[in-house]
Image (spheres, helix red, strand yellow):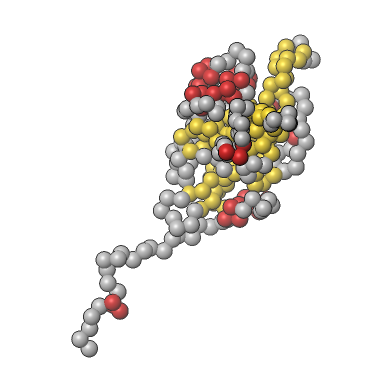
Amino acid sequence: MCGRFALTATADALQAFFEATELERHEPRFNIAPTQPIVMIRTNGDVIRRDGDNRPDRESLFVRWGLLPSWVKDPNDFPLLINARAETAAGKASFKAPMRHRRTLIPASGFYEWQRAGRNKPQAYWVRPRDGDIVAFAGLMDTWSSVDGSEIDTGAVLTIQANSAINHIHHRMPVVIRPEHFARWLDCKTQEPRDVADLLTPIDEDFFEAIPVSDKVNKAANIGPDLQDEVEIVPEPEKASPDVLRPSDQLTLF
């Protein structure tokens, strides 16, 4: 899954990376948590560029992280959908329409994950691209309208089975869309979900590197760059077998 991520690249860097005409300005964020606003990239009609090429324009918008389908009547009775399983999203009621009509890209500098297996206390990792500081996660968005007419844009991150480089930390990871596939993924006019299904696969094993970090990232209130500082992993003490008696537990004749 993806429960926390970061975006520290500037709007100018994102504008160049996504080939967008204009992006919303934002501050560096080191600990983005569910229900907070996140940046999404989507297409917004066609524009005639200086080179004469008529291509879909790309724009950014802020949405709430936690998708709320447009058909939901009472959001208080609906779960917070921060992730969507890529393998089944096209057939799920909550994600079927967004997969067909509202696919997006989510700019990130990396994400956090927690290793739980075999540990008393989960170990946090900062997972970032080895090359460059921007990665595009596959995203979905929907717009929910209340009875009073107000609207809220919401979104979720698509996840896939983790590759072998990440699987020892967690069995799921965000779907990464490479720049050469941005146009296909964002094209909801001519590209059906089945046409882009080949993009919903784990990224290459050498794409990310995982760095152990402190548990300060567990609290959404902690937002400083020190969250990504590497820490040394202290081995867990071995547990004594309950079948082995300590000397103090044994009977004595003296």
As drawn, the residue found furthest toward the front would be 147
**Residue drawn at (57%, 55%) of the image:** 215
Residue 227, placed above or below residue 130: below
Q: In this view, does 52 lie to the left or right of 199?
A: right
**Residue 243 locus on image (x, y percent):** 26, 66
**Residue drawn at point x = 61 percent, y = 20 percent:** 101
Pick out the residue farthest to the left.
Answer: 253
- The total number of labels drawn is 0
Q: Which residue lies furthest to the right in this view?
A: 50
Q: For the C terminus, which image quadrant?
A: bottom left
The one of 4 and 238 positioned closer to us in this rendering: 4
Residue 171 in sight in this render? yes
Q: Is residue 237 left or right of residue 72?
A: left
- Residue 179's quadrant in the figure? top right
Q: Residue at x 61, y 55 (%)?
A: 216
**188 relative to 210, above or below:** above
Image position, residue 87 (x, y; %): 47, 28
**The furthest residue to the bottom:** 254
- Seen from the viewer's position, the closer of residues 193 and 133 is 193
- Residue ID at (61%, 35%): 74
Q: In which quarter of the image is residue 77?
A: top right
Can residue 110 be spotted in the picture? no
Q: x, y (%) of residue 134?
A: 65, 35
Where residue 249 appears, as percent x and y from the top left, is 28, 77
